[in-house]
Amino acid sequence: MPNRVNRKMNQEAFRFRLRVEKAKLFSGRRDSNLEVLTLTAGAAAEDHAPLVHDQFVAVRTHKIHGEKLKLIDAALRRLDEGTFGKCEDCGRPIALKRLEAIPWASRCVPCQERTVDSAAAEEVEEHFKMIA
Ligand SMILES: [Zn+2]
């Protein structure tokens, strides 16, 4: 069953890539850690603006890293459970090209686009509720 073997090899390749991505997140976190958050205390007033910007970037990066880490962990779990590469919405296989670009993708392109649309629609609705 060459197909089966290929698929298994792909899965191991994806597992490896996910682990590399995860390791990168952790090493990045050490470089751009949140030390910058403690820096304003002793800084001169004119230095505050760039520091506040750095803090904003650090917090945002930290948050994005956290979210990516969650996605990677979920993908590794799917590899263990044997559901990796299957769309979590429609159950159809996710295109290999998409997985190669985004190994932690949990949805096929049409489902992802639907999700983005509905999330955006909800946001707009929330906005109108707020100003109504
Ligand atoms: Zn789907």
Image: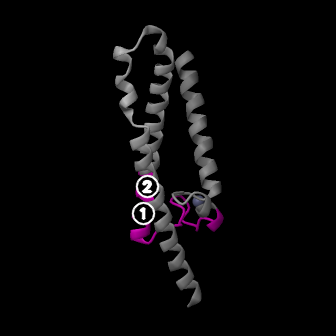
Residue that appears at 45% across and 44% down: 65
Camera-side residue of 47 and 57 = 47
| Residue 64 badge | none
Displayed quadrant of residue 30:
top left
User: Does the image show residue 88?
Assistant: yes
Q: Locate residue 78, reporting x and y percent.
A: 43, 65
Residue that appears at 51% across and 71% down: 13
Name the kind of residue labelled 2 in the image. Lys
Q: Locate residue 93, reporting x and y percent.
A: 58, 68
Look at the numbered disc 2 and give the secondary structure of its residue. Answer: helix
Left or right: 40 as drawn, with respect to 89: left
Question: In which quadrant of the rendered image does the N terminus lie?
Answer: bottom right
**Cβ(mark 2) to ligand 1 < 8 Å?**
no
Q: Which residues are magenta?
A: 70-97
Q: In this figure, which residue is indicated by the disc labeled 2?
A: 22
Ligand 1 picture quarter: bottom right
Q: Nearer the viewer, mark 1 or mark 2?
A: 2
Q: In this figure, which residue is indicated by the disc labeled 1?
A: 76
Displayed quadrant of residue 97:
bottom right
| Marks 1,2: beta carbons within 8 A | yes
Q: Is residue 51 above or below residue 8?
A: above
Q: Residues within 10 Å of mark 2 (few under 14, many from 20)?
A: some
User: Considering only order in the chain, which callout, 2 or 1, is on the residue closer to the N terminus?
Assistant: 2
